[in-house]
Image: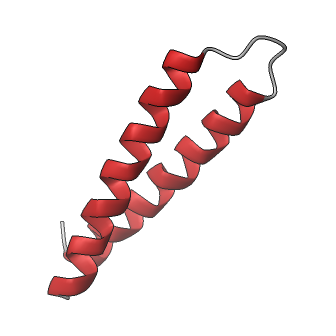
Amino acid sequence: MSLEERLEALKVRHSTLEDMIQQELSRPLPDEIEIHALKKEKLRIKDEMAGIATRH
């Protein structure tokens, strides 16, 4: 997988996680632990994307 393909896959996953966070937040009783885990994963992906961007 090329860096461009990896970056695109990460962007898609980042967007999916944002959608999942928003969906959880819209529930009457959102699961704060789930939201925290999703945000942590989203941040990890953002950091990986930044790393790829600086190497590219």
Examine the image and state in which quarter residue 52 appears: bottom left
Examine the image and state in which quarter residue 51 appears: bottom left
Name the residue: 18% across, 65% down. 1
Q: Left of 38 or right of it: where is 27?
A: right
Q: Nearer the viewer, residue 46 or 1?
A: 46
Q: In this view, does 23 lie above or below 14?
A: above
| Residue 15 coordinates in the image, percent (x, y) | 56, 54
Examine the image and state in which quarter residue 2 appears: bottom left
Name the residue: 20% across, 88% down. 56
| Residue 27 coordinates in the image, percent (x, y) | 80, 19
Q: In this view, does 28 lie above or below 41?
A: above
| Residue 39 coordinates in the image, percent (x, y) | 47, 39
Q: Left of 50 or right of it: where is 9?
A: right
Q: Is residue 13 above or below residue 55?
A: above
Q: In this view, does 5 lie above or below 9?
A: below
| Residue 42 coordinates in the image, percent (x, y) | 43, 47
Name the residue: 73% across, 29% down. 25
Q: Left of 20 or right of it: where is 6?
A: left
Count the marks: 0
